[in-house]
Image (cartoon, rainbow, N blue to C red):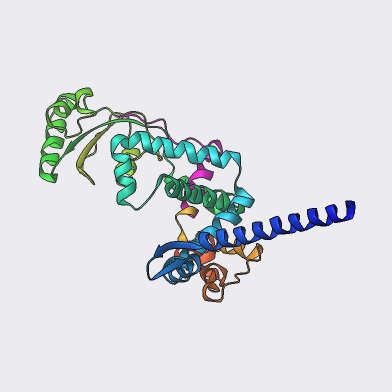
């Protein structure tokens, strides 16, 4: 009786297992359908095959880059930076932020992914770049110390020249700023701006023109900007000092210049991707990383070397 009992138990167990397998199989088959209709279903495989012909290569490219760069340069610090930058922009745009994301075809998740990619590329370029003396010299040329200045912003060049003539004739700069400036944020203070340097979100021409002025000096030509014409007065120019005293600032300027060089950035990412030994199994997507794996023209890889050649030829 005991053996028969054991045998019956075994049969019952086998039946239960078989039933479970059938149910799992049906569940998987059912789950494989993205959509169902009366005339047929759309499976995950069908959708995948269709989507990879349109966005497959770019999507795979981004996924591989994120994975490789995150492994080498990511971590908790990157996560914190992503969330911080996202919240900063969310606060900056306020109620308009959701609409801006939608109009740009972003979700919060995909926008954070874009922020992450930019941070990882920046980290990669920073880690893989060895700055030369020439890099620091070039950065020194564009370095601007923290300046204190005031300005008057007007719509056209003629008005700007008229105001410069009035200042040269002895009229008060502060009063003219209050009466004429289009910059509502500074006009009530006589056009005085917060202390700024080369990192300020101002027009580069405005920063350059301001840095050329001495204490108390007023620009004698209108400075054209994206919002009009500026008349600038220098309040305090501390001077650049010695190059050796600004190593960290110069390093940031030089790295920013490298990050703005698409060919150089691609050369860095290309090397990292090559070192990761990527193997794409899908035949259709085999060439997804081709742009990153192909040899980059050496003349484009090192922008510093090319600038050295230009400078040496000029000196001759």
Does residue 39 show up?
A: yes
Q: Please determine whether, in this image, residue 2 is positioned above or below residue 198.
A: below
Residue nearest the observer in this picture, 211 or 261? 261
Q: Taking 221 as reference, is 7 left or right?
A: right
Q: Main secondary structure of the magenta part?
A: helix
Examine the image and state in which quarter residue 286 appears: bottom right
Residue farthest to the right? Answer: 2
Residue 297 can be seen, yes or no: no
Q: Say which quarter of the image contains residue 42.
A: bottom left
What residue sits 41% from the left and 35% below the top? 88
**In the rendered image of this protein, does residue 112 appear above or below residue 284?**
above
Left or right of 220? Residue 263 is right
The span shown in magenta is 235-258
Residue 135, image x, y percentages: 53, 52
Q: Nearer the viewer, residue 19 or 255?
A: 19
Question: Which residue is located at x 55 percent, y 53 percent?
Answer: 125
The number of callouts visible is 0
- Image location (x, y in percent) of residue 28: 57, 60
Q: Relative to the observer, which residue lies in front, 138 or 295?
A: 295
Q: Residue placed farthest to the front in the image? A: 1
Task: Give the answer, above or below, for where 290 lies relative to 263.
Answer: below
64 left or right of 253? right
Tell me residue 262's x, y (percent).
Answer: 46, 60
Q: Is residue 159 left or right of residue 119?
A: left
Task: Point out residue 126 in the picture as x, y percentages from the top left corner.
Answer: 57, 49
- Is 103 rendered above or below residue 178? below
């Amino acid at each position: 009786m005991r053996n028969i009992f054991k045998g019956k138990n075994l049969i019952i167990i086998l039946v239960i297992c078989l039933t479970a397998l059938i149910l799992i199989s049906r569940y998987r088959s059912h789950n494989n359908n993205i959509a169902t209709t009366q005339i047929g279903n759309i499976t995950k495989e069908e959708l995948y095959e269709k989507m990879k012909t349109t966005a497959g290569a770019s999507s795979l490219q981004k996924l591989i880059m994120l994975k490789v760069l995150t492994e080498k340069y990511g971590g908790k610090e990157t996560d914190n930076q992503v969330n911080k930058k996202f919240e900063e922009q969310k606060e900056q745009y306020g109620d308009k932020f959701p609409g801006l994301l939608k109009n740009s075809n972003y979700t919060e998740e995909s926008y954070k992914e874009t922020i992450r990619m930019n941070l990882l590329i920046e980290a990669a370029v920073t880690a893989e770049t060895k700055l030369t003396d020439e890099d620091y010299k070039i950065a020194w040329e564009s370095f601007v110390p923290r300046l204190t200045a005031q300005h008057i912003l007007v719509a056209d060049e003629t008005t700007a020249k008229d105001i410069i003539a009035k200042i040269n004739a002895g009229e008060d700069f502060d009063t003219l700023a209050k009466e004429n400036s289009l910059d509502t944020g500074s006009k009530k203070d006589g056009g005085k701006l917060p202390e700024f340097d080369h990192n300020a979100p101002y027009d580069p021409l405005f920063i350059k023109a301001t840095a050329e002025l001495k204490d108390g000096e007023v620009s004698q030509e209108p400075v054209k900007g994206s919002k009009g014409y500026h008349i600038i007065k220098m309040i305090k120019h501390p001077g650049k000092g010695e190059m050796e005293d600004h190593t960290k600032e110069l390093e940031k300027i030089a790295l920013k210049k490298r990050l703005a060089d698409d060919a150089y950035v691609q050369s860095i990412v290309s090397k990292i991707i090559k070192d990761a030994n990527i193997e794409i199994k899908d035949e259709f997507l085999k060439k997804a990383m081709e742009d990153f794996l192909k040899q980059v023209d050496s003349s484009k890889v090192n922008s510093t070397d090319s600038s050295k050649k230009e400078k040496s030829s000029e000196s001759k």
